[in-house]
Amino acid sequence: MAFDTHNHTHFSFDAEMGIQEALQEAARHHLNLVLTEHYDLNERQDDGAPVDFEISNYFETYSAYRGEHLLLGIELGLDNRQDYVARNREIVAAHPFDMVIGSVHNLQDYDMYTDRGKNFLSKQDFFTQYLIYAEHTIHRNPYIDTFGHIDYPCRYLSYSDNVLRYEDFPLLIDNFLSTLIENDICLEINLRLIDQGGFREGLESIVRRYRELGGQYVTIGGDNHGPETIGVKYPLGAAMAKEYKLTPVYFKNRKRIVDEPMN
């Protein structure tokens, strides 16, 4: 069975999903799961609490489930400041994760979720800063396995048109994608917006360019925080990968494995 490689259970601050319901729903959709709990050293929750989890407890709690149908990963909030880079490297080195997603949830002191009302930049200026920052961050964090949700800001910005399209930022997106390819890092086809009109077209334009530049491998992630979304949009991600002759993969013991086609 195929793997959905981006999932959050109650170990993530913004999810309450239990492992049994996650596995049951995944099996119903003929899917396996990689859990990727949030760990963002450079973020805080609304109440000031850190965005992290007790990693040793995570492995202890889920070790009995780990195997053919469930793998244990992490979603790291990336930053290009050296102290965060060093700490993230230590976290990865110290624990037996199967897979590491690297994501950009904020631009140093600007959180794209909690601070979205503070954004006074034009859309052109915002995405210019975001894409440059994301590229630099990958240069400083080349140890990750896949880059999560390139279109993450599109969820929360307040422009009349939030879609990130390749044709609007061709040089910056080329630089970012080329950096992924040079560092043998996958691009994630994130499913959160894939069924929403222009957002699908925007993501597809980036996925298509990734292939044109020589990208070969993608991970397909539902970014699921509850069982009700598991498997629902996965066929759309698999179809997009197939359309552009990209190979879906997952990671086990930090080794890339070609995924099975979805039944």
Image (cartoon, rainbow, N blue to C red):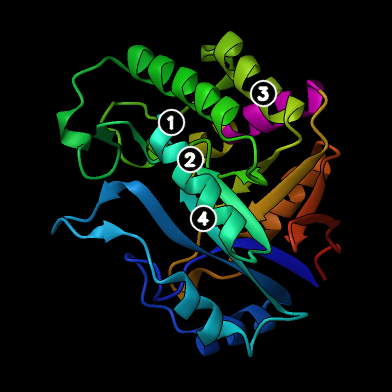
* Vertical side of 225 occupied by 158: above or below: above
The residue pinned by badge 4 equals: 91
The reply to whether the C-beta atoms of the residues labelled 2 and 3 are less than 8 Å apart is no
In depth, the one of 5 and 236 nearer the eye is 5
Secondary structure beneath dot 4 equals helix
Cα separation, mark 3 vs mark 4, equals: 23 Å
* Front position among marks 2 and 3: 2
Residue at 30%, 33% in the rendered image = 157
Name the N-terminal-most of marks 3 and 4.
4
What is the spatial separation of the Cα atoms under label 1 and label 4, in whole angstroms? 14 Å
Label 4 amino acid?
Ile
Residue 52 locus on image (x, y percent): 36, 61
Q: Which mark is residue 235?
A: none
C-alpha separation, residue under disc 1 versus residue under disc 2:
6 Å
Residue under the point 81% across and 36% down = 244
Q: Amino acid at mark 2?
A: Ala
Q: Residue at x 71, y 73 (%)?
A: 31
According to the picture, the residue beneath numbered tag 3 turns out to be: 179
Callout 2: SS: helix
Q: Amino acid at mark 3?
A: Thr
Quarter of the image with the C terminus in it: bottom right
- The residue under label 2 is 86
Residue 25, can we see it?
Answer: yes
Res 242 quadrant in image: top right
User: Which of the two labelled residues, at mark 3 and mark 1, occupies the earlier sequence position?
Assistant: 1
Of the residues under marks 2 and 3, which one precedes in the sequence? Answer: 2
Which residue in the protein does label 1 denote? 82
Q: Disc 1 marks which amino acid?
A: Gln
Residue 55 within the segment the image draws in magenta: no
Residue 212, image x, y percentages: 80, 22
Q: Is residue 57 left or right of residue 215?
A: left
Q: CA distance from mark 3 to mark 1?
A: 19 Å
